[in-house]
Amino acid sequence: MQAGVKTILVIDDTEDVRNLIASVLTSYGFTAREAPNGQLGVQMIAEEKPDLVICDVNMPAMGGYETLAAVRESSHTATIPFILTTGLVGRDGFRRGMVCGADDYLVKPFTPHELIEAVMSRLVRQSDVQLEADKRAQKLHEYAARYPFPELTGKFHGTIAPVLA
């Protein structure tokens, strides 16, 4: 994978839809990977850790909600942005997706512009969150360098040393 190129996994049981979404993503410079069902999608997410997932809600065996739940259960994949897609969504379905941890929802049929807008919005948000986390980690590192914690340096004094010995 090239540095800077974002990888997006498209999970949809309808091959034509999957191919169309992947084609649009590729034409915008993304690397698109495809999975025909939720089970394979979860496996690919765990192994490849894509930058974003686009997943259909209505699939046999393991639907989008179940796929999303499996992704959110693992600390290794929980932060990956996840966009649900569906042609049949009511208020309850939308709420269920958001409660399960979806980052966005696209109702089919959607335009290439709507797809790219949703993808870019989620990637920018993820990037902003990562930058903020990096800044906080750097501040903590600087603080720790100025004020070393004895328990981290091995210089124990007082009552805690005998407990750890």
Image (cartoon, helix red, strand yellow):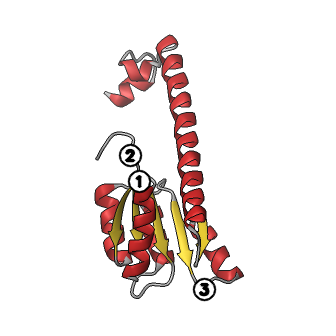
Q: Amino acid at mark 1?
A: Phe
Q: Amino acid at mark 3?
A: Leu
On the image, numbered disc 3 is attached to which residue? 88
Q: For this rendering, which residue is in front, 39 or 16?
A: 16
Q: Which mark is residue 5?
A: 2
Residue found 34% across the figure and 39% down from its top: 3
- Foreground: disc 3 or disc 2: 2
Residue 102 appears in which quarter of the rendering?
bottom right
- Using residue 17 as the reference point, say whether residue 100 is left or right of it: right
Distance between the Cα atoms at labels 3 and 2?
32 Å
Q: For this rendering, which residue is in front, 28 or 118?
A: 28
Q: Amino acid at mark 2?
A: Val
Find residue 25 and report its horizontal and vertical position in percent.
44, 60
Residue found 51% across the figure and 17% down from its top: 142
Distance between the Cα atoms at labels 3 and 1?
27 Å
**Could you tell me if residue 161 is visible in this image?**
yes
Find residue 31 and report its horizontal and vertical position in percent.
36, 55
